[in-house]
Image (cartoon, helix red, strand yellow):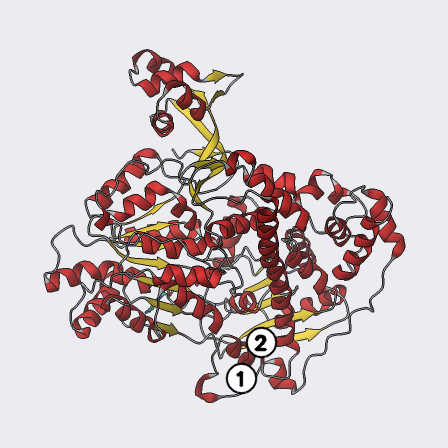
């Protein structure tokens, strides 16, 4: 029975691997990262620094290329039942088996997984061929992927094919974790999947340094997240590069469906990949008709969509931005006698599974979905993809249209665009930038008097949840800020997080065990657990400090009791912990400087998001074939040096799509006054602008302003104009 977490799906791990295995000498950790000399270098420096640490190229697969190819092809047939490799798969696999680092940029569904699954199996065979390693010494492949649900599917599929694979995530029971560790120690496991958050677990990193036979390959899925230029930059990904280094992995393969030339460069830099080991498959799909039509208002889109669907039967995805929109649009379609269902992340798991299954089985024709739909969906005969709203980036557009026509048959992709699409997108793009004063208060809170007194190596805890609420900063930028302090400034390092709350319901076995459990941890649990009505509450940190026992042993005993059915344990309140790496900023000047630098980064991210949205519009309204513009964005041409696809809107009409002009800029002073009346905040113009524009934030929710009629009352205004007005209002008398 997996341990239930109260608050989040955070892949904490708590103490999962702590103390299982530690390297015994320096040689076992040759990849240890040196600290940056330049305290304030930018991410580029971080990328270079991580990549520059020398990684040994242990060319244990030093067989001839021919035998490498033979082994790979044999595994493809035996284990996966396919006759030949697709596109660039073979090149990428051979590079890996030769001992190189590689980057595979293949569109969705092109077969990236085999690029690491085949090497993971091939190492053993090649080792035996060249006699370089004995039994059990073949090491493992680690796959770092942010998509926990997909990892589980992949593990199940691999196990069915007789390939020893597993996945280390927070739903694993204690015995399951131990079984995985034992399999790694014995050299039995070939592939281990984990989420990037797992790499914050120090015990996990330690065990990976001394896995039997070593880590032969690290596969980094969704590798574009490592790049600031990528559409979904996740600073956590820079930790993957550091991890590869620290565990001294033999080689790396990075995989992504979408990488512009700049993003590819960043990935290569971070993971030390040479240009010759970049394998790219064109995203161009000759059977897709890329179309766009401009209309005046959102309302105008409905009859057009109904008409389109009548003329283009077949499985269809309609992408919208908001969850509520998915529900209303599905219901509108049903009223028009279409067989449609909604799909969004807010639905219950069973409902989502049902919609997916029905769509796969052709029991539902149309799914109206948010971005949440599509990952891992491999339906070959999707005939249409309709965009009701503006996609946030060209990458997102490309991935979503890429779900159509995988069977190679003609398929239509239509975007109905109008000026009303912009505020919604802008809302998302602007939601993450906190006000500068919020950032200032946050950094003062992180580097409090108590924390700055800590010496190098000492550890402190911070509640992201509390900080997000107190300083009005969303979780995602908060994570970016912490990662910046870690990776760019080298001040702190995230380590294994802890749960702050444990509670349990006791079963009769628990009471029987009270009298027989002689372990000090068991005795401490029985003594210190406090019963409320139904639940016992227990604080392992407090018990540890009062008894001298180790916190992790107490938590482990709790988990064992849970696994034995003696109690039903729930853990919650993930508390990230950080180790101090160097002297922390103490003075006002030092904090101010840090605030300036971090804020500049955050502002740039906002501008990037706005620019990316505009790029989608440019592609659709440009005087160029859509398919060739799309390929060019990813640094490629159409095949055979063609300039035109021949069937996109531009190719068919020879004219650019013209978007009706946005309404002229005006400021509704009455509405501005209404916002100022509804909320008495005068210390933060950005906050007021957000309320008026309709952007939620922790403070907006706390003050219940999202329920107020003024919320979103000025969403048709430009955000800059709102900022100007509210800055003036905040500066003047109340
Ligand atoms: N050489 C091949 N021959 C035939 N089928 C293949 C081959 N390689 C992969 N496939 C199949 O193609 C499908 C898609 O593969 P996979 O899931 O690896 O794609 P992907 O590139 O990872 O896509 P995504 O970006 O959606 O994760 C799978 O069913 C896989 O088994």
Which sits in the foreground, 562 or 408? 562
- Packing grade of label 1 (10 A; few <14, some 14-19, many >=20) is many
Give me the residue at 27% from left, 66% from top.
96
| Position above or below: 654 against 189 | below
Where residue 182 appears, as percent x and y from the top left, is: 23, 40
Which sits in the foreground, 551 or 5? 551
Secondary element at image label 1: loop
Q: Residue furthest top?
A: 515
| Position above or below: 494 against 246 | above
Earlier residue among tags 1 and 2: 2
Give me the residue at 50% from left, 66% from top.
403
Which sits in the foreground, 676 or 661? 676
The image quadrant where one finds ligand 1 is bottom left
Q: Is residue 346 visible?
A: no
Q: Which residue is mark 2?
A: 290
Q: Is residue 635 left or right of residue 111?
A: right
Where residue 52 appears, as percent x and y from the top left, is: 35, 63
Q: Which residue is mark 1?
A: 645
Q: Is residue 189 left or right of residue 399?
A: left
Where residue 5 appears, as percent x and y from the top left, is: 47, 35
Image marks 1 and 2: residues in contact by CB distance under 8 Å: yes
Where residue 153 appears, as percent x and y from the top left, is: 38, 51
Q: Is residue 595 visible?
A: yes
């Amino acid at each position: 029975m997996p341990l239930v977490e109260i608050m989040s799906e955070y892949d904490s791990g708590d103490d999962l691997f702590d103390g299982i295995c530690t390297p015994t000498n320096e040689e076992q950790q040759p990849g240890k990262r040196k600290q940056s000399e330049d305290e304030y270098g930018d991410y580029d420096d971080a990328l270079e620094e991580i990549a520059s640490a020398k990684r040994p190229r242990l060319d244990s697969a030093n067989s001839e290329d021919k035998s490498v190819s033979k082994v790979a092809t044999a595994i493809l047939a035996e284990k996966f039942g396919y006759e030949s490799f697709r596109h660039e798969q073979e090149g990428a696999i051979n590079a890996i088996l030769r001992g190189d680092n590689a980057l595979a940029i293949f569109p969705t569904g092109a077969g990236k997984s085999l690029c690491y699954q085949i090497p993971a199996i091939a190492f053993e065979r090649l080792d035996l061929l060249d006699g370089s390693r004995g039994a059990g010494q073949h090491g493992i492949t680690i796959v770092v992927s942010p998509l926990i649900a997909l990892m589980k599917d992949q593990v199940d599929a691999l196990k069915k094919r007789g390939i020893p694979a597993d996945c280390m995530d927070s739903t694993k029971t204690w015995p399951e974790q131990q079984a995985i560790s034992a399999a790694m120690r014995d050299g039995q496991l070939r592939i281990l999947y984990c989420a990037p958050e797992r790499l914050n677990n120090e015990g996990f990193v330690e065990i990976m340094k001394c896995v039997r036979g070593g880590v032969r390959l690290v596969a980094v899925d969704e590798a574009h997240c490592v790049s600031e230029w990528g559409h979904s930059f996740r600073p956590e990904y820079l930790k993957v590069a550091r991890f590869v280094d620290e565990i001294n992995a033999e080689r790396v393969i990075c995989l992504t469906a979408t990488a512009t030339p700049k993003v590819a460069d960043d990935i290569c830099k971070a993971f030390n990949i040479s240009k010759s080991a970049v394998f790219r498959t064109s995203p161009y799909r000759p059977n897709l008709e890329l179309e766009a039509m401009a209309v005046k208002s959102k309302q105008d889109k409905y009859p057009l969509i109904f008409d389109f669907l009548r003329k283009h039967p077949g499985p269809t995805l309609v992408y919208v931005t908001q969850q509520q929109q998915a529900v209303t649009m599905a219901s509108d379609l049903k009223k028009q006698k279409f067989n449609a269902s909604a799909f969004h992340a807010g639905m219950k798991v069973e409902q989502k599974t049902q919609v997916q299954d029905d769509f796969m089985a052709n029991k539902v024709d149309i799914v109206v979905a948010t971005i949440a739909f599509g990952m891992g969906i491999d339906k070959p005969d999707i005939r249409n993809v309709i965009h009701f709203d503006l996609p946030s980036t060209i990458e997102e557009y490309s991935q979503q249209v890429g779900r159509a026509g995988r069977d190679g048959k003609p398929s239509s992709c239509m975007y109905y665009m109008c000026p009303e699409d912009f505020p919604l997108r802008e809302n998302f793009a602007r939601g993450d930038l906190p006000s500068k004063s919020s950032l200032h208060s946050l950094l003062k809170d992180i580097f409090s008097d108590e924390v700055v007194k800590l010496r190098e190596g000492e550890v402190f805890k911070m509640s992201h949840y509390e900080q997000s609420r107190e300083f009005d900063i969303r979780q995602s930028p908060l994570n970016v800020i912490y990662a910046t302090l870690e990776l760019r400034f080298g001040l702190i390092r995230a380590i294994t997080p802890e749960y702050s709350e444990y509670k349990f319901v006791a079963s009769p076995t628990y009471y029987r065990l009270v009298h027989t459990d002689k372990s000090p941890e068991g005795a401490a649990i029985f003594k210190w657990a406090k019963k409320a009505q139904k639940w016992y509450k227990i604080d392992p940190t407090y018990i540890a400090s009062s008894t001298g026992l180790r916190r992790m042993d107490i938590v482990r005993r709790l988990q064992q009791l849970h696994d034995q059915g003696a109690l039903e344990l729930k853990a919650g309140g993930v508390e990230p912990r950080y180790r101090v790496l160097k002297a922390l900023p103490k003075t006002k000047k030092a904090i101010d400087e840090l605030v300036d630098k971090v804020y500049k980064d955050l502002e740039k991210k906002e501008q990037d998001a706005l620019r990316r949205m505009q790029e989608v519009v440019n592609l659709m309204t440009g005087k160029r074939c859509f398919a060739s513009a799309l390929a060019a964005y990813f640094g490629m041409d159409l095949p055979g040096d063609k300039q035109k696809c021949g069937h996109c809107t531009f190719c068919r009409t020879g004219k650019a799509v013209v978007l009706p002009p946005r309404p002229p800029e005006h400021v509704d002073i009455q509405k501005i006054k209404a916002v100022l009346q509804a909320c008495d905040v005068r210390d933060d113009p950005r906050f007021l602008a957000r309320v008026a524009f309709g952007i939620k934030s922790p403070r907006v929710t706390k003050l219940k302003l999202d329920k107020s009629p003024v919320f979103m009352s000025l969403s048709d205004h430009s955000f800059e104009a709102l900022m100007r007005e509210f800055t003036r209002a905040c500066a003047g008398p109340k």
